[in-house]
Amino acid sequence: MRFKKKIDPRNAGFGSQIDGRQRDPRQYFTVRRILTPEIIELDGGLQVRLLGVKAIEQQSARALAYLSGLIVNRRVYLRFDPAARTGDGEPLQAYVYARNRTFINAHLIKRHYAGVAENMEFHFKQRFARYAKA
């Protein structure tokens, strides 16, 4: 049996990444500096509040050092929560992920460098509460 038409497997793909042409749908930003354990500044001057994170006064220096070592001058991407509301003049609220998909908000709470913001509603509230108790 002869095939009438040859198919290039790179064009078919079948879910694989043979040639790496697939584009990453995330938009990445570079972290310029850490303002507080709750707020970071991205390239272009955009300020972002880490959603669900509440600074702990005694751990503030440790949290700043941890964030500086982890994400300053590195690329991150943001995910937004439809349940979270941002008022006028307030920093944008988002979940922040490192390029390697490290969930920065959760890691601050897991390491007890920050607490859970109980005064707002957000998707990961129960998960963050579990991390804070562990």
Image (cartoon, rainbow, N blue to C red):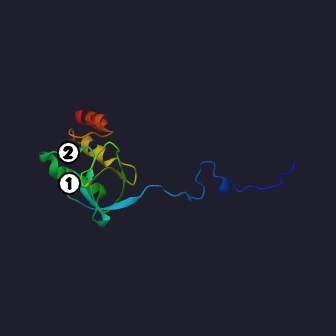
Q: Position of residue 66 (x, y in %)?
A: 24, 52
First-in-chain label (1 vs 2): 2
Based on the displayed image, in which of its 4 quarters is residue 10 positioned? bottom right
Q: Residue at x 12, y 46 (%)?
A: 58
Q: Residue at x 24, y 51 (%)?
A: 87
Nearer to me, 36 or 118? 118
Position of 11 with respect to 4 (left or right) is: left
- Residue 64's disc number: 1
Q: Residues within 10 Å of mark 1 (few under 14, many from 20)?
A: some
Based on the displayed image, in which of its 4 quarters is residue 69 positioned? bottom left
Q: Position of residue 98 (x, y in %)?
A: 36, 53
- Residue 54's disc number: 2
How many numbered tags mark residues here? Answer: 2
Nearer to me, 33 or 86? 86
Q: Pick out the residue farthest to the left.
A: 58
The answer to whether residue 112 is visible is no
SS of the residue under disc 2: strand
